[in-house]
Amino acid sequence: MSAVEYAFFRILRLFRRLPANPLSVGNKKVIFLEYFKGFDKVEAVQGIFGARTTEVLSHLKVELSWLMGYMYVDGSDGHLVISKGYLNKGNRTDIYLDLIHELCHVKQFMEGKELFDPKYEYVDRPTEIAAYRYAVQEARRLGLSEERIRCYLRTEWMDDEAFLRLAKSVNVAAPTLHYKP
Ligand SMILES: [Zn+2]
């Protein structure tokens, strides 16, 4: 999941044809497995890439971005872009679940799927729903409460209606509404 995913994908599309992405200037590139050591041993990650997990993660490039936001997969070559600020200050559980979510997108990209299909709204896009479902499944396995999972799903760029649609698509119960008598 990523706010940048939503906010920047249109902008990134515009820059795609340029020889150098101006938004990438000054960004450091690292290899996923060298940066996130041991991730190839994580069951949820092995569930995405199977026998190719170590191979994929030792080739996957990660761009550490100075831009604000969270993380997203670059639709031009499938590398992962992560906001340095988010890595430094974000909640560890959220970051972990986001990485699981984004690795689903990496797999989808490898399968030739269109990650930012503009035919769909963000919360209705099949690639997003699949990635959210997998992250929610992992969140439950970790023992997170439904309330905490709702909190994870809810991001600042989703309005109530979009959030409820997403929650329903990934089988997370909507919050109980309290009516004043
Ligand atoms: Zn996503």
Image (spheres, rainbow, N blue to C red):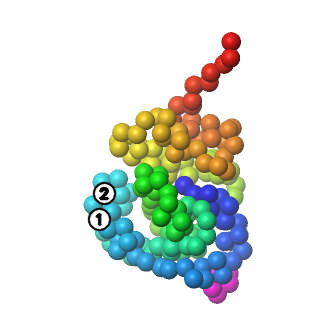
Q: Locate residue 82, reporting x and y percent.
A: 52, 67
Q: Residues within 10 Å of mark 1 (few under 14, many from 20)?
A: few
Residue at figure coordinates x 68%, y 71% from the top left: 13
Task: Classify 64 as above or below 89.
Answer: below
User: Which residue does the numbered mark 2 point to in the structure image?
Assistant: 42
Magenta stretch: give its range.
17-21
Q: Locate residue 171, reporting x and y percent.
A: 50, 35
Residue at figure coordinates x 64%, y 81% from the top left: 21
Check residue 99 in the rendering and tell me which mark sits there, or answer none: none
Task: Classify 103 as above or below 59.
Answer: above
Task: Classify 102 as above or below 63.
Answer: above
User: Which residue does the numbered mark 1 point to in the structure image?
Assistant: 38
Q: Residues within 10 Å of mark 2 (few under 14, many from 20)?
A: few
Viewport quadrant of the C terminus: top right
Q: Amino acid at mark 2?
A: Val
Q: Disc 1 on helix, strand or loop?
A: loop
Q: Amino acid at mark 1?
A: Gly
Q: Locate residue 8, reporting x and y percent.
A: 67, 65
| Most common SS among magenta residues | loop
Q: Is residue 118 magenta?
A: no
**Residue placed most toward the observer, 14 or 1:** 1
**Residue placed most toward the observer, 56 or 113:** 56
Residue at figure coordinates x 70%, y 55% from the top left: 119
| Mark 1 to mark 2 CA distance (whole Å) | 7 Å
Q: Disc 2 on helix, strand or loop?
A: loop
Give the residue furthest to the bottom.
19
Q: Locate residue 85, reporting x and y percent.
A: 54, 66
**Residue placed most toward the observer, 106 or 179:** 179
Is 181 on the left or on the right of 145, as rendered? right
The answer to whether the residues at label 1 and label 2 have Cβ atoms under 8 Å apart is yes
Q: Quadrant of residue 52?
A: bottom left
